[in-house]
């Protein structure tokens, strides 16, 4: 049975971000991906220059109407990431709700991009839209610590807090929550980041259970763009393949990230030369070169079941 994803994200001509980060890995793992490009830019905005166009909410609606008129608006997953516009986000919610009416089993995977390290990098007025409209219709969300705190109004300073925040997010709607990074002290030393996951699962015998994990991920001293988009796409894929095993799904997802990032960083340093900081172009994710790792990642980090 083929699995079809509607991915509504940014597009860049050069490099990997948004749909460019998500489509290839999902296709490699056997998913059909239909892409709507929320922006079309020459490259990501971390470069010195960029040019391009932004899709409006009305234009998004027109594209969706076209799909609908041909009666091919049947999806198993919807995937969304970075958005700067409230009306666009509200239109996404309308589309998700309509698709869920057609297929009640549709899974909406949302990266609620609001900010990081205590500051927002989208307009303030997106916060209530995510909190009150987007998260309630989402099934899988991938906030960082700052975003999880913002959405729940609760701070995370201990592992217990992290679990409570994930439970609060479950109550808002999503059955799967992964806090992609946090400031909590790692057990493996300060060269690691702590991430958490929680999944409410309906078991074959009809009982409900919640699986929770903690995973420590090696830090990398570089700024990458498109990693969050790749992460959300991989979590979609691996939770699809392991619907009742959050531990394995997270280990596979984080391991893919590790392999892609390691390949990217070694290439970037090689290109930049000794003692020089790699440029944004040199730090573009080595996606095609990582095809084998995306398909079958060697597990390089183990999650702890909480």
Image (cartoon, helix red, strand yellow):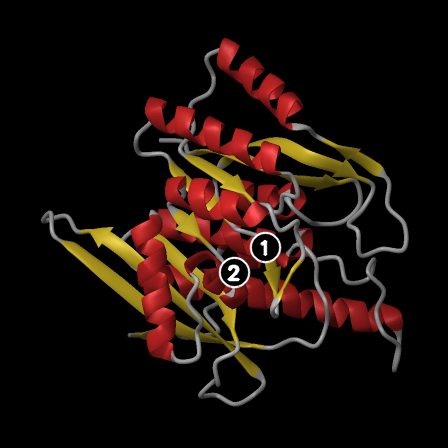
Towards the viewer: 173 or 65: 173
* Residue at the image position 72 percent from the left and 72 percent from the top: 222
Q: Is residue 224 visible?
A: yes
Whether residue 157 sits left or right of residue 61 in the image: it is: left
Towards the viewer: 248 or 83: 83
Quadrant hosting residue 18: top right
- Residue 217: % across, % down: 51, 75
Residue 246 vertical position relative to residue 196 in the rendered view, above or below: above
Residue 249 vertical position relative to residue 118 in the rendered view, above or below: above
Farthest-out residue, top: 69
Quadrant hosting residue 197: bottom left
- Which dot marks residue 147? 2
Residue 102 vertical position relative to residue 80 in the rendered view, above or below: above
Residue 293 vertical position relative to residue 39 in the rendered view, above or below: below
Secondary structure type for disc 1: loop
- Residue 116: % across, % down: 61, 65
Quadrant hosting residue 37: top right
Residue denoted by label 1: 114
Whether residue 269 sits left or right of residue 190 in the image: it is: right
* Residue at the image position 64 percent from the left and 22 percent from the top: 58
């Amino acid at each position: 049975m083929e699995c079809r994803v509607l991915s509504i994200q940014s597009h860049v001509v050069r490099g990997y971000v948004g749909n460019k980060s998500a489509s290839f890995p999902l296709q490699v793992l056997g998913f059909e991906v239909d892409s709507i490009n929320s922006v079309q830019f020459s490259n990501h905005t971390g470069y010195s220059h960029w040019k391009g166009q932004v899709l409006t909410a009305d234009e998004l609606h027109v594209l969706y109407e076209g799909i609908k008129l041909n009666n091919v608006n049947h999806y198993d997953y919807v995937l969304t990431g970075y958005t700067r516009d409230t009306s666009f986000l509200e239109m996404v919610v309308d589309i998700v709700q309509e698709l869920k009416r057609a297929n009640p089993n549709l899974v909406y995977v949302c990266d609620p991009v609001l900010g990081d390290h205590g500051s927002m990098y989208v307009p303030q007025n997106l916060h209530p839209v995510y909190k009150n409209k987007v998260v309630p219709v989402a099934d899988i969300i991938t906030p960082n610590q700052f975003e999880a705190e913002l959405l729940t109004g609760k701070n995370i300073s201990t592992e217990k807090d992290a679990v409570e925040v994930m439970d609060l997010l479950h109550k808002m709607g999503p059955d799967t929550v992964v806090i992609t990074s946090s400031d909590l002290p790692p057990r493996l030393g300060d060269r690691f980041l702590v991430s958490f996951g929680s999944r409410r699962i309906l078991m074959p015998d009809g009982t409900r259970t919640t699986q929770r994990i903690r995973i420590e991920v090696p830090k990398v001293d570089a700024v990458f763009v498109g990693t969050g988009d790749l992460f959300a796409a991989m979590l979609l894929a691996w939770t699809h393949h392991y619907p009742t095993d959050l531990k394995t799904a997270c280990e596979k997802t984080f391991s893919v990230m590790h392999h892609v990032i390691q390949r990217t960083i070694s290439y970037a340093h090689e290109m930049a030369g000794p003692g020089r900081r790699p440029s944004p172009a040199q730090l573009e994710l080595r996606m095609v070169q990582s095809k084998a790792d995306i398909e079958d990642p060697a597990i390089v980090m183990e999650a702890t079941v909480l």
